[in-house]
Amino acid sequence: MKKSVWLLFLITAPLHAFAQEHHSPYAGQEAREIKALSQDEIQAYLTGQGMALAKAAELNQYPGPLHVLELAAQLQLTEAQKLQTQRIRAAMLKEATNLGKLIVEKERELDALFATGKIDESTLRTLVGDISRLQGELRTAHLRAHLELKRILTPEQIKRYTELRGYEGKEAGAQHGGH
């Protein structure tokens, strides 16, 4: 009997210790200004950063305006291409920052309603719907800039961009049908 009690203790003691040390991945985030968003995410929304929203375009040979401007010399952009790229980027940034501000405001409102206990299902559905719609519009703005930019670059510039960005490895060529 003593052996079985001792054996039970040896088996359960580590489990108890593990349970005591197991924290939620959210631990520490309860002090955030907006619980659902990190400070970096808030900053990205407010400044129109890409946040990988246009990855579908970027990785399928639709260059992004910021990186095209950064690589202007290597891509041998004409002055007209630079101006068009700058215009596309400025329009995208204006739209993205406006949408980002609205997303942050809606997230702040949602957080406050939960914090005060004043949330109900109708308000929840409305706010989450608004946030989702705004996030979709934000992603569209970023993707549209890539779509517009592809129209002003030559196939050679796009190929060079793809190489300079490191997307033309063995796997990338296979994924793009050898393009």
Image (cartoon, grey):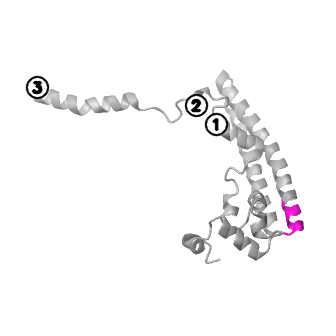
Residue 148 image position (x, y, % from top left): 82, 64
Give the magenta-colored segment's residue range. Answer: 78-85
In the orientation shown, which residue stands out farthest toward the top? 116
Label 2: element kind: helix
Residue 165 falls in image quadrant: bottom right
- Which disc, if any, is residue 176? none
Residue 63 image position (x, y, % from top left): 73, 64
Above or below residue 84? Residue 18 is above
Decide whether residue 82 is among the magenta residues: yes
Residue linked to disc 3: 2
85 relative to 13 in the view: left or right: right
Residue 39 falls in image quadrant: top right
| Picture quarter with the N terminus | top left
CA gap, disc 2 and disc 1:
8 Å
Identify the amino acid type marked 3.
Lys
Labels 1 and 3: the sequence-earlier one: 3
Q: Decide if residue 113 is in sight here.
A: yes
Contact? badges 2 and 1 (CB < 8 Å): yes
Residue 116 image position (x, y, % from top left): 67, 21
CA gap, disc 2 and disc 3:
46 Å
Label 1: element kind: loop
| Picture quarter with the C terminus | bottom right
Residue 83 image position (x, y, % from top left): 88, 62
Residue linked to disc 1: 38
Above or below residue 145? Residue 9 is above
Please name the residue shown 69% across and 53% down the image. Answer: 53
